[in-house]
Image (tube, helix red, strand yellow):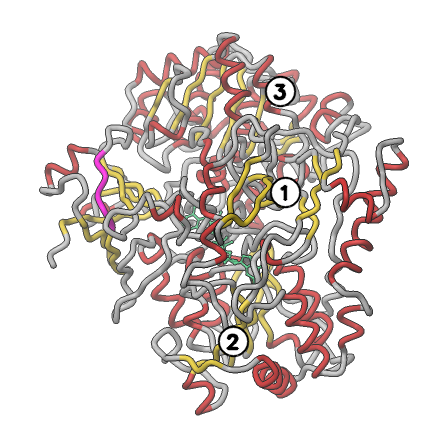
């Protein structure tokens, strides 16, 4: 009988076996709503895109390290492992790597931010591996902070509420929504496609059930989004589609009604917040002559006054949970919608109330809204980074293009380092970064770019040395994710593809050549690390009187239950006793107004939430030339760009192009029919995509998800449909410098062959 082996991914746990040479996947039988993304995994073992041999760029090999605009255009020479390891070791040595290297002279020229989701598995997590390696051989590296997922939101919340990870992973919102919420007002909808995935593991997909239970109880859902299907169909959700980027104006009008109709909870504000007095004059128009009333908001959002007024009254009358999705802060001035949603919830006096108040990112990622765990998860130690220098993660092109120049971040004036080596493993910047033609210029600057990858992505085609890495299916690991109630043995499902090696083994070999193998490995192989990393979790389970077998016992059982935390979460503790459990903010309370934030945000940053526009939005002057709002959101058929070659993702393509959705009225006006190949363009470049006409997309909007592999033509335009050719590479504000990849202005026309 075929033995199915246990495994796990960012989008679900499963068992798998090879049947007739192809991986057959069985989703976790306990999962109420398994993700169809599992259908992308089988291709990972046999697809031609898999890297099978080490590659070195011809120009680098022949002419040596140095800035080179041939990156992205050059061809590659295959190499044997011993030879390529020697080559990498020699180049790292030239750049200053050695045992006990002095961080002051070596690592400060190395960018090891290496952002990316990589794949599930606590040990083979590629970013942790590269960090430990660079700490070992260079003594440190220039790192990155924040994430492409949530930077503007995380930064503003760090001032006004606290640590985002603690907040978003600390609340059993799904249970509360299912049992208590009366009105769920959700900005950015609540797209189940995003709840499919969660970093490290997501074995129970409970969002759909939570919403269904709430609907059965009579909960009202209002989804504010340009896309109707950002909320699951069939539950009677109302769809409100303001112009994208104008949600703050809508929230302000709701707040104006709360304040002027006498429903404001001043006791709640006094007990739990600070700085409302800075905000109210702006809200009521005393400071700028403009009350943020319904008519004002209707003009900006293009919603009707009755729609806004009805919603304003409803939130005052019901137990209301105001949820704000990550997408809303991935925009210019992305701090404002997050800050304003929190402010509105506080004015209603509902923060801290189960099933009500403020939620961030419910529907942005699978495990937000589940109960936090009561035991620690296994972690791979990354060592000590002796370099204090960092960039906000989405400033990577600026880092490479503008060495020595200054920028601001959280009130600091910082200087971009002079980077000679870029080392990347487990990420695909030519998928995730904005303005990809500019990123190409940036990647031409360093002396050397080294990438470990499982497949030939656009990032490997801009690297000098490409080292083929195994996927999780080809190695053993421990699978677990925040708020996920299981720990899994990830058994090896298949032999390595071609000559691919585990990132750990690659780093251990290079460290060996540099004379510091033992510092990197501590004498352990992968199994040895898994056993060591498992121990703190085992001990914590034992301390709680739970099943806690030794490592071999765990491996045989293949799965362990992890208990949820039983103590109060951060927000609940604060609301229970704000003096005893203050928030980590300047006042110890929720911050609605603050001169510190205004100072840190630079000249035009307001001391309270405010409507400041959204960069490339339909009210901007640039809309005259590029009149359509591009929503470059997360894809439904893959995680980011991962396994875009997989069957489930490929089935969604139109003649090999990524689908772009638009309203039929906009299509007719441009003589575009269903299935046509279209050219989407703006001043930054152009991409080809396949047209899908849909009434679920509001007029004036086009939606092209991220993750189609960047396939540049000679101009750097994308033949496949990666929207990041079109999105702006600027920081959300001088405060956060967050990614603004969600919105851009574009035009679209039939593609002429
Ligand atoms: P992934 O496609 O997950 O994208 O950006 P990210 O770089 O994380 O890339 C991971 C890569 O790791 C894949 O190429 C995969 O093959 C490789 N990999 C997987 N496992 C391993 C391994 O074990 N070893 C090695 N060496 N490699 C491995 C995601 C980022 O994109 C994120 S988080 C967000 S939220 C952003 N979202 C948007 C957006 O909404 N709009 C736009 N326009 N742009 C975005 N970009 C951001």
The residue where tag 3 is placed is: 175
Q: Nearer the viewer, mark 3 or mark 1?
A: 3
Q: Residues within 10 Å of mark 3 (few under 14, many from 20)?
A: many
Q: Are marks 3 and 1 in contact (CB under 8 Å)?
A: no
Q: Give the main secondary structure of the magenta stretch.
A: strand
Alpha carbon of mark 2 to alpha carbon of mark 3: how far?
49 Å
Q: Are marks 2 and 1 in contact (CB under 8 Å)?
A: no
Q: Quadrant of the N terminus?
A: top right
User: Residue at coordinates 66% horizontally, 58% vertically from top-left?
Assistant: 124
Q: Eyeballing the image, is 574 above or below 4? A: above
The residue where tag 2 is placed is: 54
Alpha carbon of mark 2 to alpha carbon of mark 1: how far?
43 Å
467 within the magenta span: no
| First to last magenta residue range | 689-693
Left or right of 586 on screen, residue 307: left
The residue where tag 1 is placed is: 158
Q: Residues within 10 Å of mark 2 (few under 14, many from 20)?
A: many
């Amino acid at each position: 009988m075929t033995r199915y082996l246990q495994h796990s991914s960012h989008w679900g746990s499963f068992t798998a076996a090879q049947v007739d040479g192809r991986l057959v996947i069985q989703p976790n039988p306990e999962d109420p709503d398994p993700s169809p993304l599992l259908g992308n995994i089988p291709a990972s073992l046999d697809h031609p895109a898999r890297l099978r041999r080490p590659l070195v760029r011809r120009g680098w090999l022949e002419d040596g390290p140095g800035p080179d605009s041939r990156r992205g255009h050059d061809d590659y020479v295959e190499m044997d492992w011993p030879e390529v390891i020697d080559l990498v070791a020699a180049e790292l040595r030239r750049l200053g790597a050695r045992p006990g290297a002095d961080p002051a002279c070596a690592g400060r020229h190395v960018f090891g931010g290496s952002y990316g989701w990589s794949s599930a598995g606590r040990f083979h997590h590629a970013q942790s591996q590269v960090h430990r390696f660079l700490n070992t051989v260079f003594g440190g590296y220039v790192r990155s902070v924040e994430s492409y997922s949530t930077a503007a939101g995380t930064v503003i919340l760090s001032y006004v509420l606290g640590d985002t990870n603690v907040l978003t992973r600390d609340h059993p919102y799904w249970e509360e929504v299912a049992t208590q919420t009366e009105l769920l007002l959700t900005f950015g909808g609540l797209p189940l496609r995003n709840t499919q995935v969660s970093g490290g593991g997501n074995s129970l997909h409970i969002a759909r059930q939570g919403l269904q239970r709430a609907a059965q109880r009579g909960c009202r859902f209002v989804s504010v989004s340009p896309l109707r299907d950002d909320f699951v169909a069939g539950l009677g959700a109302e769809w409100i589609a303001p112009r994208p980027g104008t949600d703050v104006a809508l929230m302000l009008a709701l707040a104006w009604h709360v304040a002027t109709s006498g429903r404001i909870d001043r006791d709640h504000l006094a007990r739990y917040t600070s700085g409302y007095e800075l905000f109210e004059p702006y809200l009521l128009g005393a400071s700028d002559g403009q009350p943020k009333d319904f008519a004002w908001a209707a003009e900006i959002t293009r919603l009707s006054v009755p729609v806004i007024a009805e919603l304003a009254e409803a939130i005052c009358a019901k137990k209301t949970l105001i949820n704000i999705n990550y997408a809303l802060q991935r925009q210019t001035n992305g701090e404002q919608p997050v800050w304003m949603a929190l402010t509105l919830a506080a004015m209603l006096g509902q923060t801290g109330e189960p099933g009500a108040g403020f939620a961030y990112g419910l529907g942005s990622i699978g495990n937000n809204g589940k109960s936090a765990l009561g035991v620690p998860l296994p972690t791979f130690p990354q060592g000590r980074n002796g370099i204090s220098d960092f960039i906000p993660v989405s400033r990577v092109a600026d880092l490479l293009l503008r060495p020595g120049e200054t920028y601001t971040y959280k009130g600091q004036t910082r200087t971009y380092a002079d980077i000679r080596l870029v080392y990347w493993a487990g990420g695909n910047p030519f998928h995730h970064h904005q303005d990809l033609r500019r990123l190409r210029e940036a990647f031409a600057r360093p002396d050397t770019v080294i990438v470990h990858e499982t497949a030939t992505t656009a990032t490997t085609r801009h690297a000098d040395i490409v080292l083929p890495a195994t996927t999780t299916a080809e190695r053993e690991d421990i699978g677990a994710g925040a708020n996920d109630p299981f720990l899994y043995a990830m058994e090896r499902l298949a032999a390595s593809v071609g000559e691919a090696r585990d990132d750990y083994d690659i780093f251990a070999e290079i460290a060996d050549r540099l004379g510091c193998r033992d510092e990197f490995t501590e004498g352990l192989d992968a199994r040895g690390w898994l056993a060591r990393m498992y121990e703190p979790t085992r001990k914590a389970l034992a301390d709680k009187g739970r099943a806690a077998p030794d490592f071999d016992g765990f491996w045989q059982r293949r799965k362990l239950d992890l208990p949820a935390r039983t103590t109060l979460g951060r927000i609940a503790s604060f609301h229970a006793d704000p003096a005893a459990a203050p928030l980590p903010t300047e006042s110890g309370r929720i911050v609605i107004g603050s001169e510190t934030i205004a100072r840190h945000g630079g000249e035009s940053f307001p001391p309270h939430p405010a409507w400041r526009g959204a960069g490339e939005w339909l009210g901007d002057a640039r809309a005259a030339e590029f009149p359509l709002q591009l929503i470059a959101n997360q894809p439904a058929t893959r995680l980011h760009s991962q396994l875009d070659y997989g069957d489930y993702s490929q089935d969604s393509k139109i003649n090999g192009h990524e689908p772009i959705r638009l309203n039929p009225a906009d299509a007719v006006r441009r003589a575009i029919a269903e299935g046509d190949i279209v050219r989407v363009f703006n001043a930054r470049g152009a991409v080809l995509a396949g047209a899908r006409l849909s009434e679920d997309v509001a007029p004036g909007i086009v939606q092209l998800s991220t993750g189609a592999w960047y396939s540049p033509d000679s101009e750097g335009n994308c033949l496949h449909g990666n929207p990041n050719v079109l999105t702006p590479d600027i920081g959300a504000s001088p405060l956060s410098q967050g990614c603004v990849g969600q919105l851009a202005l574009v035009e679209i026309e039939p593609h002429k062959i």
